Image: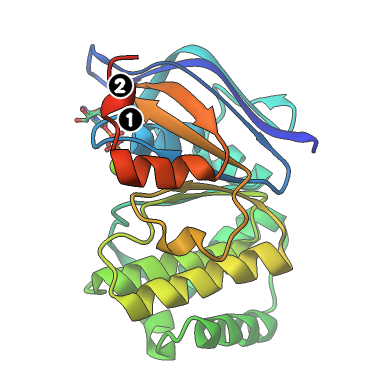
Amino acid sequence: MAQLLKVEDLKVKAEGKEEEILKGLNLEVGEGEVHVILGPNGAGKSTLGSSLIGSPEYEKIGGKVYFKGEDITEESADKIAKMGMFLSFQNPIEVPGITLSNFIKTSLEIKTGERIRLWDFKKKLSETMKLLSMDEGYADRDLNVGFSGGEKKKAEILQLLMLKPDLAILDETDSGLDVDAVHIVSKGIEEYRKSVGGALMIITHSTKILESLNVDKTHIIVDGRVVSEGGPELVSEVNENGFEKYENM
Ligand code: ADP
Ligand code: MG
């Protein structure tokens, strides 16, 4: 598989702070591959996701990030999104004053550089919301404002399916969801694989959403570094034995 993402010795700290959170992290993802990121709380998984998409909350103080062969280490979040990278946040923020529908339409227009016909957009949005068993009324509500945890996660998957990125980073998209919501989120992810064929980087503590996916590679992150890598078998190994044996590596 051709290389899609390469993270080389990445060192990251939070803006305005001194301490390194990522301490020389290495990772590679090929086009269309499914990768799983495991690691104890506080290991730096969410920081990795946010840093990759260019969040100004974090500062890259060493190393390089390449996406589609281009050095994006210093690129803005807008440019990175436009290039086809997407992050589903662990804690999606509420955005009063912009509806879910307008948010997605604007994001699509930025990504494609074209104006989108409202009729076509509404039709596609409505079909995709049906697939995710989302009440269509949510399209005209302010983004995430007053949404339940499950609705926020579904709204993230809706964006994923509408924006069709080449790399989707899902940060604990399955956590805190009831069984029905996990099922719907899984269905959305499967649909993304089928219709877009994009690569996935799944940060998770559970195996539920991995069941319907063919995992190519697993990475274990402890204290800001990838300390072990393997195939899908590593997921069940960690679920049985925990992270203890990786914590002093
Ligand atoms: P994980 O997602 O693996 O649980 P995080 O990436 O959220 O871990 O956090 C890794 C470490 O970095 C934690 O100790 C956390 O407190 C710290 N951290 C993350 N973001 C910030 C921030 N914006 N400011 C200060 N510390 C942060
Ligand atoms: Mg996290």
Q: Residues within 10 Å of mark 2 (few under 14, many from 20)?
A: many
Question: Label 1, label 2: how many angstroms apart (C-alpha)?
Answer: 7 Å
Residue 72 circle label: none
- Between label 1 and label 2, give the one nearer the viewer: 2
**Relative image position of residue 200 (x, y in whole percent):** 58, 49
Question: What is the number of callouts on the image?
Answer: 2
The picture quadrant where one finds residue 165 is bottom right
Which residue type does callout 2 highlight? Asp
Q: Residues within 10 Å of mark 1 (few under 14, many from 20)?
A: many
**Relative image position of residue 192 (x, y in whole percent):** 63, 65
Is residue 115 something one can see in this rendering?
no
Q: Is mark 1 within 8 Å of ligand 1?
A: yes
Q: What residue is shown with label 2?
A: 223
Is residue 30 something one can see in this rendering?
yes
Q: In the picture provided, is 227 more to the left or to the right than 179? A: right
**Relative image position of residue 193 (x, y in whole percent):** 66, 62
- Residue drawn at x 34%, y 35% is 39
- Above or below, 151 against 167 in this view is below
| 236 vs 179, nearest the viewer | 236
**Relative image position of residue 149 (x, y in whole percent):** 26, 68
- Circles 1, 2 touching at the beta carbon (< 8 Å): yes
- Residue drawn at x 26%, y 28% is 244
Q: In the picture provided, is 246 more to the left or to the right than 74? A: left
- Residue drawn at x 30%, y 32% is 243
- Above or below, 122 against 192 in this view is below
Q: What residue is shown with label 1?
A: 44
Q: Secondary structure at mark 2?
A: loop
Q: Secondary structure at mark 1?
A: loop
* Quadrant where the image shows the C terminus: top left
Q: In the picture provided, is 198 more to the left or to the right than 95? A: right
Q: Earlier in the sequence, mark 1 or mark 2?
A: 1
